[in-house]
Amino acid sequence: MSKIKKIAVLTSGGDAPGMNPCIRAVVRTAIYHKLDVVGIRQGYQGLIDNNMYDMSPRSVSNILDLGGTILKTARCLPFRTDEGMEIAYNNLKAQGIEALVVIGGDGTFTGALRFSKKYPDIAVMGVPGTIDNDLCGTDYTLGFDTATNTVIEALDKIRDTADAHDRLFFIEVMGRDSGCIALRAGISCGAEAILLPEKETAIHELIASLKAGEHNKKSSSIVIVAEGDKHGGAYDVAQMVKEEIKNYDVKVTILGHLQRGGSPSAFDRILGSRLGYAAVLGLINGETQKMAGLKGNSVRLTSLEEALMVHEYKLEEDLMQMVEILSI
Ligand code: F6P
């Protein structure tokens, strides 16, 4: 058991629905265990700017249903420098903060790991918070479920109008280098094709399958293009296909940042609560440089190094095969 008395919590990188339930869990678990808690505003930028405040159980009242993050967030370049880290360290020491919970994605964890290796007397614990679902050591990241449901809601609406006009839509969804949102949303909405960064789709095959759809009397088609797809964005793919598909009127929609907002789903509220709770217990138990994640239905701690081994994206072949069969 460690003897930490004061911890801080921050959210960093792209906001994700579920961050607020997680902040709430961190604050209340820490206070229950007689720790002081400091909230850091705007992620690592707040560490450098000394933008911090003491939190109480009431600081996190009625936030379970809020999207975004009450602590604000930022993508902070100065924290990548030795000078930035030193200022952050001195600010933490001046406040008597001995441990940090960082809620964010791979950029956040990379920063946390570097910082903690340089200043091991500050313990760090990560919670995966990104809509991209692209970290190892956890089956789900905070925000992925809500974002997927947001995309599904949008796709259902687009299907209505696509069908009414016999149109072919190319819809671009977020996920950076991960096709997780694209694949799940595509299955849920019966997309005719899904273009993912994990798989190079030959454009002539896409055209052939869209033509087969026409031949099979489909009145509309939806192609989901994950933003990390190698052909470029939805506009580029639409351009490549347009000339060959004469009978459909072609439209493009970029869903953009609406995918990051909104009230967290039940799944993300529960996940945020479980992981925030576990992160604080981990710190109390003397853990550091770890991430609290969900494997199966169990909360597990994984080293930040392992969590960051993201870049071998695996294509879920079985799901892609199913998509092909179910969209005939
Ligand atoms: O990492 C979350 C994410 O929404 C990605 O899906 C997307 O590529 C990126 O952030 C967008 O970042 P920003 O909000 O800084 O433009």
Image: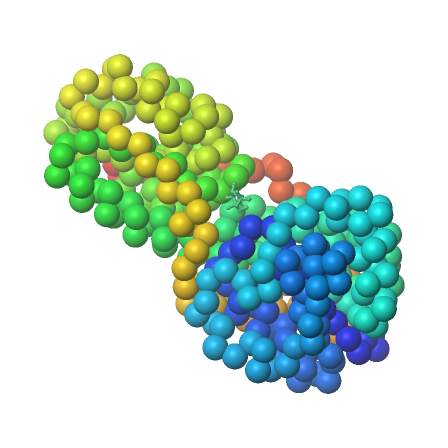
* Residue at image location 69% in from the left, 76% down from the top: 54
**Relative to 109, residue 96 above or below:** below
* Residue at image location 15% in from the left, 28% down from the top: 216
230 displayed left or right of 91: left
**Relative to 213, residue 57 above or below:** below
How is the structure coloured here? rainbow
* Residue at image location 66% in from the left, 84% down from the top: 32
Picture coordinates of residue 326 (x, y %)? 26, 39
* Residue at image location 50% in from the left, 51% down from the top: 131
Picture coordinates of residue 143 (x, y %)? 49, 56
Q: Quadrant of the C terminus?
A: top left
Picture coordinates of residue 118 (x, y %)? 86, 52
Picture coordinates of residue 300 (x, y %)? 64, 63
Q: Nearest the camera: 162 or 200?
A: 162
Q: How many marks?
A: 0
**Relative to 224, residue 51 above or below:** below
164 displayed left or right of 110: left
Q: Quadrant of the N terminus?
A: bottom right
Q: Nearest the camera: 235 or 212?
A: 235
